[in-house]
Amino acid sequence: MKVILHIGAHRCATTSFQGYLGRKERELSARGIVCVGPKRIRSGLFHGIQPGPMPVIGRDPQKRARGRLALHMRSLSDVGMQSVLFTDASMMGRLEENIAAGSLYAGIGERLARYDWAFDGAISDVVLNIRSLDTWWASALSHSLTVTERWPGHDQLAKIAEARRTWRDVITDIYCAMPGARLLVCPHEDFATRPAAQLSAVTGQPSPATSGMFRLNPSLRLPHLRASLPARIACRLPAGNGRWGPFTEMQAASLREAYADDMMWLIGGADGYAELLESPNKNKGRETAPTRHLTRGTTHDPTEGHMAGAG
């Protein structure tokens, strides 16, 4: 049985993809594909894989997790499932950790090595969504602002813009942690509103169709962002109806350039570490350049998704 981990990233239409999988659950099951989303994963299925507070029971939590997963997979195989897709962006870590560190998923290598061990090397594919760094960080900061009500300072924004860690480093860490798995990279710009196309690209099979644009949990545009924040913070946002853009033009350009370098590396074969997937109809509904809906003042964005708990 094929085992696929869809690990996110956050703010890359993960919730939209999960929402699509949830709505098409019966059709996918009939095709031999079962999808396990955040609700099931976070209710105990992956408990013990990553370090954290554990009850004292005298047994190794990682070994228990490994056994639990083996039983789960055997039960799916016994009923004729050909592929199982686990999807949860929390496998990469917490979004807040990236913001606090001003760096992309610094601990992902260790985290995914633990998943590789827990699955006993059975993972066949790892699916990673990436996104232009200026819009990814803008979306992450916008989301964080609504949750923490903390305005990002100039030093924090400068640290992010000047950071040398990019998606290439994340991909390299994943490859080193799971060298036996195929790493598939799906650009947000191609797949954000095309979950069926993304699933087809990952599985190599036709997927249940959707009608129109499919988008869940997008970043708030400025009017809604203002309305969601206390007046003391909302008054600092710029005027306009677009999405918040926290970076200066020079900072945003630097982040876009870093992403362009990553894409060129992926197009060139990524040193054999990963395979770049593209939507067969990527020009239809494709998100345009990051600057399109940004309003300068402090950040911009596009999408994210839903299945059984957000990614």
Image (cartoon, helix red, strand yellow):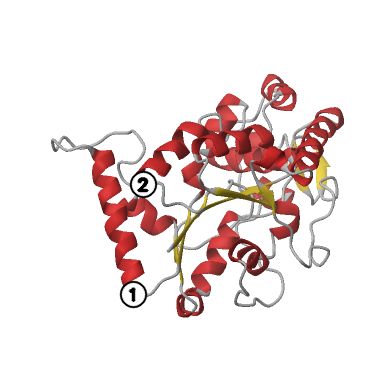
Residue 81 left/right relative to 256: left
Q: Which residue is mark 1?
A: 79
Can you give x and y, in whole percent of width and height, for residue 285 in the image?
79, 65
Q: Which residue is mark 2?
A: 120
Identify which amino acid the numbered label 2 is placed on. Asp
Q: Residue at x 65, y 28 (%)?
A: 152
Which SS class for mark 2?
loop
Counting from the top left corner in percent of width and height, residue 167 is at 67, 37
Residue occupying image coordinates x 42% and y 43%: 116
Q: On the picture, is 153 further left or further right than 309?
A: right
Residue 16 got which mark? none
Q: Residues within 10 Å of mark 2 (few under 14, many from 20)?
A: few
| Residue 74 percent across, percent down from the top left | 31, 63
Q: Nearer the viewer, residue 5 or 124?
A: 124
Whether residue 138 appears in this view of the structure is: no
Count of all numbered marks drawn on residues in the image: 2
